[in-house]
C-alpha cells in the first residue's frame, strides 16, 4: 500500500465517529457494524494516526472533518479526500470544550456511497 507523504509530519491525530443513520444503511443494504473500525484500519495502513473510534450521538447526512487548531493539515486533508467525500470545518473551541485530537472525522450518510464505489475500501 502507498503511504501518503506529509501526514506524519503534520501530526494530525484523528478521532473517528460513526454518524451514519442506520435507516440509510438499511436502505443501501450495508451493515454498519464495525464501519468506523474498518475506516480506522484503512487509514492507519496509509500512515494516519487514529487515536479513538466511537459512535456519534447525532447522525449526519455528510461526512465532516473538524479541525480544532490553526494548522492547515493540507496533506492529511488531501489524503482523506482520496478515500471519501468530506466537508472540512475549522472548529472554534468553546469555553469548557476539550478536544483531545486536532481532527475529528464524522462518517455521514454520504460515506456509504464512497464505501461501495471507492476501490480503496475493497
Image: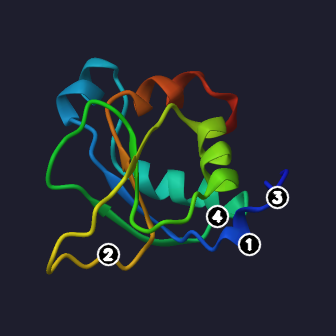
Task: Check the image and report above or below for 2 versus 109.
Answer: below
C-alpha separation, residue under disc 2 versus residue under disc 4: 18 Å
The residue wearing badge 3 is 5
C-alpha separation, residue under disc 4 versus residue under disc 3: 10 Å
Instruction: From the image, state whether disc 4 or disc 1 is nearer to you.
Output: 1
Task: Check the image and report above or below for 104 versus 63.
Answer: below
Instruction: From the image, state whether disc 2 or disc 4 is nearer to you.
Output: 2
C-alpha separation, residue under disc 4 versus residue under disc 1: 11 Å
C-alpha separation, residue under disc 3 versus residue under disc 2: 25 Å
C-alpha separation, residue under disc 2 versus residue under disc 1: 20 Å
The residue wearing badge 1 is 9
The residue wearing badge 4 is 48
x and y percent of residue 51 in the render? 48, 75
Question: Which secondary structure, mark 3?
Answer: loop
Counting residues from the N terminus, which is met first, the one under dot 4 or under dot 1? 1
Query: Do labels 4 and 3 touch, CB within 8 Å?
Result: no
Q: Is residue 104 left or right of residue 70?
A: left
Q: Classify residue 16 by image quadrant.
A: bottom left
Amino acid at each position: 500500500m502507498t503511504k501518503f507523504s506529509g501526514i506524519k509530519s503534520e501530526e494530525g491525530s484523528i478521532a473517528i465517529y460513526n454518524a451514519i443513520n442506520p435507516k440509510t444503511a438499511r436502505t443501501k443494504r450495508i451493515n454498519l457494524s464495525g464501519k468506523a473500525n474498518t475506516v480506522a484500519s484503512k487509514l492507519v495502513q496509509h500512515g494516519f494516526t487514529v487515536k479513538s473510534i466511537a459512535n456519534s450521538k447525532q447522525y449526519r447526512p455528510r461526512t465532516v472533518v473538524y479541525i480544532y487548531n490553526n494548522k492547515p493539515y493540507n496533506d492529511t486533508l488531501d489524503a482523506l479526500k482520496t478515500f471519501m467525500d468530506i466537508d472540512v470545518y475549522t472548529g472554534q473551541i468553546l469555553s469548557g470544550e476539550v478536544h483531545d485530537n486536532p481532527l475529528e472525522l464524522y462518517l455521514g450518510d454520504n460515506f456509504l456511497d464512497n464505501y461501495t464505489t471507492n476501490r480503496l475500501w475493497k
